[in-house]
């Protein structure tokens, strides 16, 4: 069982690394934001797996849940920031 968890942790770690590469090389801001969200989800799963590997899931689940909440709020805050930077079109009469 521990071997299966290690294999899964390495697979999710590899996916997290590909998400970091996507953040670094994304052609647009939205692609980078999507890669960051994907990496955050993978990081939460990786934290849960590490908790089960070390036999302390209660500690890592708490940390993972708080990180998941932050990972949910980050794209919303960033989208709001991008929307506020957009120039406002003035109506012509």
Image (cartoon, grey):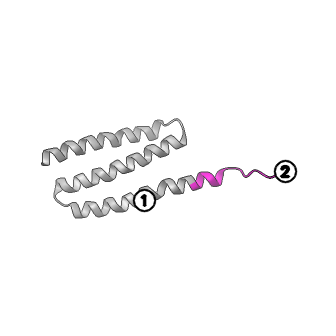
Residue drawn where x is 53% and y is 43% of the image: 30
Q: Which residue is mark 2?
A: 92
The stretch in magenta equals: 80-91
The numbered mark at residue 70 is 1
Q: Is residue 93 above or below residue 63?
A: above
Q: Earlier in the sequence, mark 2 or mark 1?
A: 1
Residue furthest front in the image: 93
Left or right relative to 52: residue 76: right
Q: Which element type, helix, strand or loop, lies under badge 2? A: loop
Q: Position of residue 8 (x, y in %)?
A: 22, 44
Q: Quadrant of residue 4?
A: top left
Q: Position of residue 88 (x, y in %)?
A: 73, 52
Q: Residues within 10 Å of mark 1 (few under 14, many from 20)?
A: few
Closer to the camera: disc 2 or disc 1?
Answer: 2
Q: CA distance from mark 2 to mark 1?
A: 41 Å
Residue drawn where x is 27% and y is 61% of the image: 61
The reply to whether the magenta stretch includes residue 85 is yes
The numbered mark at residue 38 is none
């Amino acid at each position: 069982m521990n071997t299966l968890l290690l294999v899964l942790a390495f697979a999710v770690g590899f996916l997290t690394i590909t998400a970091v590469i996507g953040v670094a090389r994304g052609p647009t801001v939205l692609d980078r934001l999507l890669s960051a969200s994907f990496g955050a989800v993978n990081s939460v799963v990786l934290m849960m797996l590490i908790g089960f590997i070390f036999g302390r899931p209660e500690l890592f689940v708490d940390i993972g849940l708080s990180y998941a909440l932050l990972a949910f709020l980050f794209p919303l805050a960033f989208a709001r920031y991008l929307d506020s930077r957009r120039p406002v079109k003035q109506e012509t009469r």
